[in-house]
Image (tube, grey):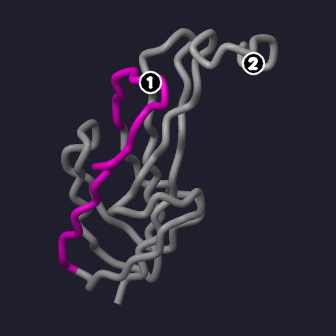
Amino acid sequence: MDWSITSDFGGANHHPIAVVNGDTGRGYVRVSAASGSSLQLSAAGSSDPDGDSLSYSWWIFDEPSSGSGSLQNATSQSATVSVSSGSEIHVVLEVVDNGSPNLTAYRRVIINVQ
């Protein structure tokens, strides 16, 4: 909330911008993948308006998912989802900056399993 008490942009930390597979919007990203296949997800293009460095975390959001899969490279800019079964797998990208305080942006990927 520091940005609400200063008129100087540099006087506050701002949340990062999370990009998934080139999609710069704020909504979820919907993709399709065959059961038994692997799907590459990329946060390339994610940025921080203050120039802070970013860390990445991907995870499968089990509650809304009606399918199963596993993640490789879950703490890197690009992750691979091995699609096992079901009709949908929800994956969340978390992007955290190293500003003070640390701020986080999230994006959801919904994988339609075919």
Residue 74 screen position, x and y as percent: 27, 43
Q: Which residue is at 27% across, 36% downward?
A: 75
Q: What is the crowding at mark 2: few (fewer than 14 residues within 10 Å), some, or many (at least 20)? A: few
Labels 2 and 1: the sequence-earlier one: 2
Q: Which residue is at 58% across, 26% downward?
A: 14
Q: How far apart, in angstroms, are the residues tagged by discs 2 and 1?
A: 15 Å
Query: Which quarter shows the C terminus?
Result: bottom left
- Dominant secondary structure (helix, strand or loop) of the stretch shown in magenta: loop
Of 84 and 106, nearer the camera is 106
Q: Which residue is mark 2?
A: 1
Classify mark 2: helix, strand or loop. loop
Q: Which residue is mark 1?
A: 97
Residue 68 screen position, x and y as percent: 37, 67
Residue 97 screen position, x and y as percent: 44, 24
Q: Which residues are magenta?
A: 36-56
Query: Which quarter shows the N terminus?
Result: top right
Residue 107 screen position, x and y as percent: 51, 52
Q: What is the crowding at mark 1: few (fewer than 14 residues within 10 Å), some, or many (at least 20)? A: many
Amino acid type assigned to the residue bearing label 2 in the image: Met
Q: Which residue is at 48% across, 68% downward?
A: 29
In reply to whether residue 46 is colored magenta, the answer given is: yes
Q: Quadrant of residue 23?
A: bottom left
Tell whether 11 sits left or right of 73. right
